[in-house]
Amino acid sequence: VAKRLEKFKTTIFTQMSMLAIKHGAINLGQGFPNFDGPDFVKEAAIQAIKDGKNQYARGHGIPQFDAAIAERFKKDTGLVVDPEKEVTVTSGCTEAIAATMLGLINPGDEVILFAPFYDSYEATLSMAGAEIKCITLRPPDFAVPIDELKSTISKNTRAILINTPHNPTGKMFTQEELNVIASLCIENDVLVFADEVYDKLAFEMDHISIASLPGMYDRTVTMNSLGKTFSLTGWKIGWAIAPPHLTWGLRQAHSFLTFSTSTPMQWAATTALRAPDSYYVELKRDYMEKKKILVEGLKDVGFKVFPSSGTYFVVVDHTPFGLDNDIAFCEYLIKEVGVVAIPTSVFYLNPEDGKNLVRFTFCKDEGTLRSAVERMEEKL
Ligand code: GLN
């Protein structure tokens, strides 16, 4: 394996989902729903295939989908973007992240991440040759340590990555935090890469796109996808929205990573993004029910549960159960209890920082969530 990837192992999500199958454990680890996406979107995909929409799409996306993304972005943020010059369709947000890093970061450029962070950020930054600076968000509220941010960011910083709502903690960046980040970015001429794939799963407060703050659109790449919002994580449809000078860079990387994204799925995704508001209301309502079952269950079992405002994840402190660290706890949980969670130490540059924390997902049907809680109540 190439040196730039030597330190990375099989992703924790793959490892844990394999163990779930091997031990017949209930999988509250990898974040994928065990229920299907909406029929109207699936039917649109079938129709597109039957209609012969099966050859390469235009590199940056079919015009109809680019337009639907721009429309949705305007509804969500008030920002008007040119779908031809500022929207790029990618194979999932993971590719948008990779294309952004590879298209806009030079070897040696400093990029700031907030830990815990989604694993692909570090790996793609490593492929880009970036110098990673890390700021740790700590429980119970995972607030941004402003002084540390001020001392870390400088004229040498090329970019900062913000994931809100935040995987794995469920933290949502507050207006105040985003204001401070924005002013520091403007002062130091820093780009922002905003991963907002959980924006429609914002339960305790409104989601704010940092691109919508004054002076920020010109320095921000906003990334999103279909997977979480439409329970279609296997479709791998994502996108990046950025001003033309940043879009140019990320499109260059996208052109040579994947060239273009599945044509019929883009047609179906166009239909999805034009879903009535009621779809989003129902999605949120369903998830709030699920969240309640899991969070209350975990508290009853005896975990210390940290508040999660968005995403379909919740992070807990497992130390009441006396295992050495998060990995040991998750192994015990799989083998002895029959439930899978994700150890969080892999989401830190310094694994010690995550050793007390594990992540559970509630993107499962209510019966599955209840069974998982029952198993833990019986056997932990
Ligand atoms: N984003 C999902 C999670 O955090 C899964 C990602 C993956 O499997 N690579 O669980």
Image: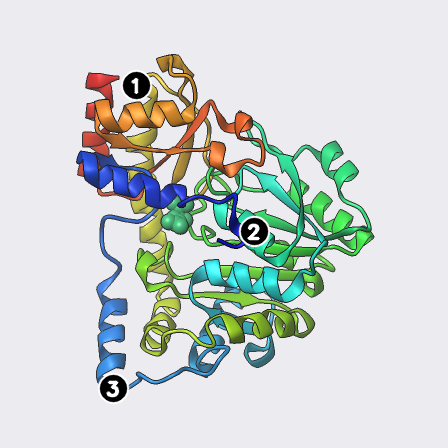
User: Percent x, y for residue 25?
Assistant: 21, 34
Which is nearer the eye, 193 or 12? 12
Q: Which mark is residue 187?
A: none
Which is nearer the eye, 87 or 102? 102
Which is nearer the eye, 66 or 105? 105
Badge 2 amino acid: Lys
User: Percent x, y for residue 310?
Assistant: 45, 42
Circle 2 residues within 10 Å: few <14, some 14–19, many ≥20: few
Helix, strand or loop at label 1? It is: helix
> Residue placed at 66% from the left, 64% from the top?
104
Q: CA distance from mark 2 to mark 3?
A: 45 Å
> Residue placed at 21% from the left, 41% from the top?
21
Badge 3 amino acid: Asp
The mark that comes first in sequence, 2 or 1, is 2
> Residue placed at 31% from the left, 44% from the top?
363
Q: Is the C-beta separation of discs 3 and 1 under 8 Å?
A: no
User: Percent x, y for residue 166?
Assistant: 50, 43
Q: Which mark is residue 51?
A: 3
* Residue to which mark 1 is pinned: 300
Helix, strand or loop at label 2? It is: helix
Q: Is the C-beta separation of discs 2 and 1 under 8 Å?
A: no
Q: Is residue 349 above or below residue 261?
A: above
Q: CA distance from mark 2 to mark 1?
A: 46 Å
Q: How many numbered circles are shown?
A: 3
The reply to whether residue 209 is visible in this rendering is no
Q: Is residue 304 above or below residue 255?
A: above
Circle 1 residues within 10 Å: few <14, some 14–19, many ≥20: few
